[in-house]
Image: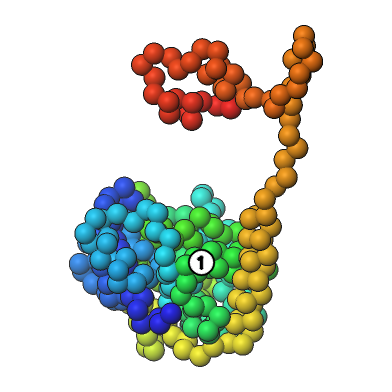
Amino acid sequence: MIIDDFKGGFLAEGLNSRRRACDAETVFRAACEAHEGITAKAEFYLSMYRFPAEFVQAVKETRYTAGYAGACWLPILWFDIDRVGDWQAAVRDAKKLVRFWVETFGLRAESVQIWLSGMKGFHIGVPIAIFGEAAVASERFAAECKAVTSEIAKRANVEIDESVYDKVKLFRCPNTRHGESKLYKIPVSFAELSEEENANWIRQRAEKPRRLVENSVSGEDCVTWLPVMACVSEAKEFWREAVERLSEKEKDTDTPRKWKAQTQTLPHSGETFPRLRRDTLEFILDGVPEGVRCGFFKRRRIV
């Protein structure tokens, strides 16, 4: 599939709000530049993945995303580090994850995006380009992202939130304000993160937006990000190995289980019949209670 076909996405002003179709890359870049139309918003979310035009058009017409099973892609692979009530642990694990990318795959620290999430920790992002043609848009791309990030987090000895890789999951938009903490999701440089005395300064700085810019000089006003366009052979091989393990796992899951048939013998006749569930027996003996739909049995706990 052609990557240029995957530019669209959706946004929402609140997790429970209706989804709105958008050019996700344009919105993300505006957010990185701390555009005032973005920074004025609280609890503003953007889709993590990018989608083909037909899905974006469907969202535009219906504002509905649940159940999408088609192809997707993303330009930045994200890791979500949540450490409720333990700021030092969040800082420590964010540094460990960035160091892993630098030491294992040779990335420059400036090529790893570090965002204070606004409340509980950090969002760490790396360019998907380093995985080359191994990371291509597909129907199972979201599952591949989860498999790869899970393996990287394991090797880096960092716990991440793996629930964010659902295909239509919302992700907090940069430079928007967290409704509870009132702090902004702002970029942080690795140098700032590495200096212990800056830990409190980072949270203070998050009281207002901050720009992430390409190929510039970082400072209090902004943070520099150096995009990576070239593939790293070790990273490409890492992706392929993780996907192979995922495929093997899926094969094991899809293999039908052989259940041993359970039977019951009637005490007087000695005849043997398949064992029935208690719900089935109650239905045979008593029928459906008056005024209750058949779905009643789906909601009952199977004993």
Residue matched to label 1: 140
Please give the name of the residue rendered at 36% of the width and 70% of the height, measured from the top-left corner.
Answer: 51
**Looking at the rendering, which quadrant does residue 119 occupy?**
bottom left
Check the image and report above or below for 131 versus 154.
Answer: below
Residue 213 x %, y %: 35, 82
Residue 222 x %, y %: 35, 78
Q: Nearer the viewer, residue 300 or 281?
A: 281
Residue 258 x %, y %: 73, 45
Q: Quadrant of the N terminus?
A: bottom left
Residue flagged by tag 1: what amino acid is it?
A: Arg
Looking at the image, residue 211 sits to the left or right of residue 232; the answer is left
Residue 110 x %, y %: 48, 82
Please give the name of the residue rendered at 47% of the width and 72% of the height, measured from the top-left corner.
Answer: 138
Please give the name of the residue rendered at 51% of the width and 50% of the height, measured from the top-left corner.
Answer: 84
**Looking at the rendering, which quadrant does residue 282 occupy?**
top right
Q: Quadrant of the C terminus?
A: top right
